[in-house]
Image: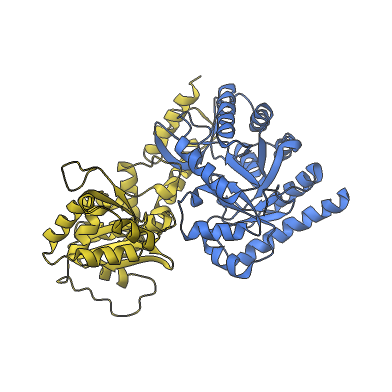
Chain colours: A blue, B yellow
Amino acid sequence: MSNDALPAACGLGLRAPHVRQVLSERPPVPWFEVHSENYFADGGPALTALERIRATCALSLHGVGLSLGSTDPLSHAHLDRLARLIARVEPALVSEHLCWSGVGGRHFNDLLPLPFTDEAIAHLCARICEAQDYLGREIAVENVSAYVAFGDSTMPEWEFVAEVVRRTGCKLLLDVNNAFVNAMNHGFDADRYLAAMPADAIAEIHLAGFERTDLCLIDTHGARVAPEVWALYRKTIARIGPHPTLIEWDIDIPEFAVLEDEAATAEAILTEHHAVAA
Amino acid sequence: MPSLHELQRRFADALLAGEGAQPAVRLAGTKTAERLGIYRRTIATNYRNALAATYPVVCRLVGARLFHASVDAHVAMHPSRSGDLNEYGGTFGDFLAGYPAVSELRYLPDVARLEWAIDVANRAADSNADPESVLRALAACPGDRLPSLLLTMDGSSRMIESPFPLLRIWQVNQPGHDGEMSVDFAVGPDRLRVRRERSGVALERMASGDFAWLAALSTRANLAGAISAGQHADATFDLGGALHRYIGDGTITGIVDAPLTGTSGASD
């Protein structure tokens, strides 16, 4: 299969518990996304399985560990592994997060929030360009969920994200669930956030479920997509047209059929707007 | 305003501080210390889950509660240095050897070392061994060069020696095991070779001479050094048989005709 763009259809995040089933049953999923780091191995059964799936299906590589926003040097070892995986599976898209994961050589292996400042924009832009130059290809960057906000931020998150994308010319992986979670956690209007996202740069959309707690919404990727997020997704697709969309589920992973059911909901919304576009 | 680096440093310090500690960064909104705790708990859970996936037998032997406490203590002592969580945890076996809460389970560190070797074997490069060409190259090597030969090994092979019946401990703690659970601690030591084969990772108990010879080769001893290690472990060590067996099964993947250095044994 060639290195084509992702289809404007709903793909699924492929996780270890489903790999065997996907290989044996070959469900009609238009494309899959995996976490890049889970395939940084030199060889072995996981990589072989991914190559078999990739032979018939488009693939998006989604990184969780590059730590683009960290003030530590960008890890060339990490980029080397990513470059090798890209060469091996020829993904349609490579993405990372607008976050940092560690400082002073210590990794927390989590997606930590950035302050929305000019300094952080300049730093992120330089790092995104460095990563793109290193890999010799464009990447997409994803807006992350956050439970705290920095008092030193000088602009709203939507301006920060849009400016990083505008300055670097990179693609945007728009996570509609993260926009909603942050709107609830930090008290802003999710519609305003989503309307500020540069439509031309959006290469992929993420949808996932969150958990409500007394403190705030937690972006667990462990539940079905919430009704409010489906409503925002429908509005987004109405504004920007059908785009490749992904259902993510990372904890308490359900039967594969549950993911397919979520994808059918997204597919119905995409179809409404395919019809409008036609 | 603090620099981005300073903000990240203070945020990291706040994550490492105890639950409820007030961070030295200005956070907007309410209940910020509690909300910071969400990150702290997510991070701890990620490491617990990652190591539980790598060390299922250790987890089963000590129970989830003690396992989580040991992972937390390990993370505090050996923080992650990589954005790839799959690389994390290779020091867990050595850590457990000095962790007082599990000191009664004296075999536990070796179980962890075995599980790490299995994990590494699962991620190693696919073998492209060609036994016939290795045998041909060996046959073509002038006799006076043989002692200084280095033999290259399949990247998935790991050698583990334990004074405990490690293979049996591992086997009776596998999810599919439904037979007798007893372990005879009078049996041992175990010398194991872990290696990924076509069907998956295989664990094999080895004779002491073969083990010492292969272990020496795997630490880049030359052939003469490895032979003396094999003979030291077992006076009846059979070099011809060992070469035939481990070239034939693809463990030894090639030979390197290295210049004589005047020493034998491990060179790095």
Q: Is residue A168 above or below residue A147?
A: above
Examine the rendering and report whether any part of residue B145 can be seen: yes
Which sits in the foreground, B144 or A245?
B144
Residue A275 shown left or right of residue A217 in the figure:
right
The percent position of residue B11, horizontal first and vertical second, equals 45, 32
Hey, which residue is sitting farthest bottom in the picture? B179
User: Measuring 56% from the left and 22% from the top, which residue is drawn there?
Assistant: A119
Residue B153 shown left or right of residue A109 in the figure:
left
User: Measuring 79% from the left and 42% from the top, which residue is drawn there?
Assistant: A240
User: Measuring 19% from the left and 59% from the top, which residue is drawn there?
Assistant: B212
Dividing the picture into quarters, in which one does residue A31 lie? bottom right
Which sits in the foreground, A159 or A244?
A244
Residue A272 shown left or right of residue A76 in the figure:
right
Q: How many marks?
A: 0
User: Measuring 30% from the left and 42% from the top, which residue is drawn there?
Assistant: B77
The percent position of residue A225, horizontal first and vertical second, equals 65, 54
Dividing the picture into quarters, in which one does residue B117 lie? bottom left
The percent position of residue B152, horizontal first and vertical second, equals 32, 52
Q: Is residue B205 above or below residue B140?
A: below
For the N terminus of chain A, give its image quadrant.
bottom right
Dividing the picture into quarters, in which one does residue B171 lie? bottom left
Examine the rendering and report whether any part of residue B252 can be seen: no
Hey, which residue is sitting farthest top in the picture? B1
The percent position of residue B3, horizontal first and vertical second, equals 49, 21
